[in-house]
Amino acid sequence: MAQDGLSKAHLRYWEEVIFQRRPGGNWWVQVQHAGRREKLSLGTPVKAAAAARARDTYHSLLAKGWDETLAEWRPQSVPRSNTTIGDFLAELKAKADLKPQTLEALRQSVAQDRVGYFRDRRRK
């Protein structure tokens, strides 16, 4: 057990407290600091690497706090675009030197793919 006198500076401590949500998946750690508890993915299925990252995360929390640590360890999400396929096709029509038949074929192909996607999802 991790409570067997091991310091949180030792990798062996972290090897005993990290966990996998599913076999073969990434390792996770649950960390508590300053009255806040979080479960964090360590981003690797390799136990030794995950233990080192868990230890580094904990030391970062002690030194920098939650906000700065999470900003470093969790990647920033890419902002979503509100551009639609119709917007894309309109811009393509205005800027690309394509035959109208090519644009129409592209539009129909996208429409068929979307119908198939939703039809297949209903079957599950």
Image (cartoon, rainbow, N blue to C red):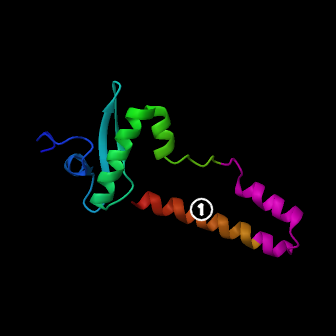
Circle 1 sits in a helix, a strand or a loop, which is it?
Answer: helix
Residue 113 painted magenta: no
Q: Is residue 26 visible to us here? A: no
The residue furthest top is 35
Q: Where is residue 73 in the image (x, y as percent from the top left)?
A: 46, 46
* In the displayed structure image, the side of residue 69 where residue 46 appears, left or right: left
* In the displayed structure image, the side of residue 80 where residue 33 appears, left or right: left
Residue 99 painted magenta: yes
**What's the magenta region?**
81-104
Q: Where is residue 26 in the image (x, y as percent from the top left)?
A: 33, 57
Q: What is the quadrant of the N terminus in the image? A: top left
* In the displayed structure image, the side of residue 14 where residue 73 appears, left or right: right
Q: In which quarter of the image is residue 22?
A: bottom left
Q: Is residue 100 visible to us here? A: yes
| Residue at the (16%, 43%) spot, across then down | 2
| Residue at the (71%, 58%) spot, across then down | 85
Q: What is the quadrant of the C terminus in the image? A: bottom left
| Residue at the (54%, 65%) spot, across then down | 116
Question: Where is mark 1, residue-wise?
Answer: 114
Q: Where is residue 80 in the image (x, y as percent from the top left)?
A: 63, 47
Magenta stretch, main secondary structure class: helix
Q: In which quarter of the image is residue 47?
A: bottom left
Front-most of residues 70 and 105: 70
Q: Which amino acid does label 1 sit on?
A: Arg
Q: Residues within 10 Å of mark 1 (few under 14, many from 20)?
A: few
| Residue at the (30%, 45%) spot, across then down | 29
Front-most of residues 31 and 92: 31
Count of numbered marks: 1
Q: Is residue 119 above or below residue 10?
A: below
Front-most of residues 39 and 53: 53
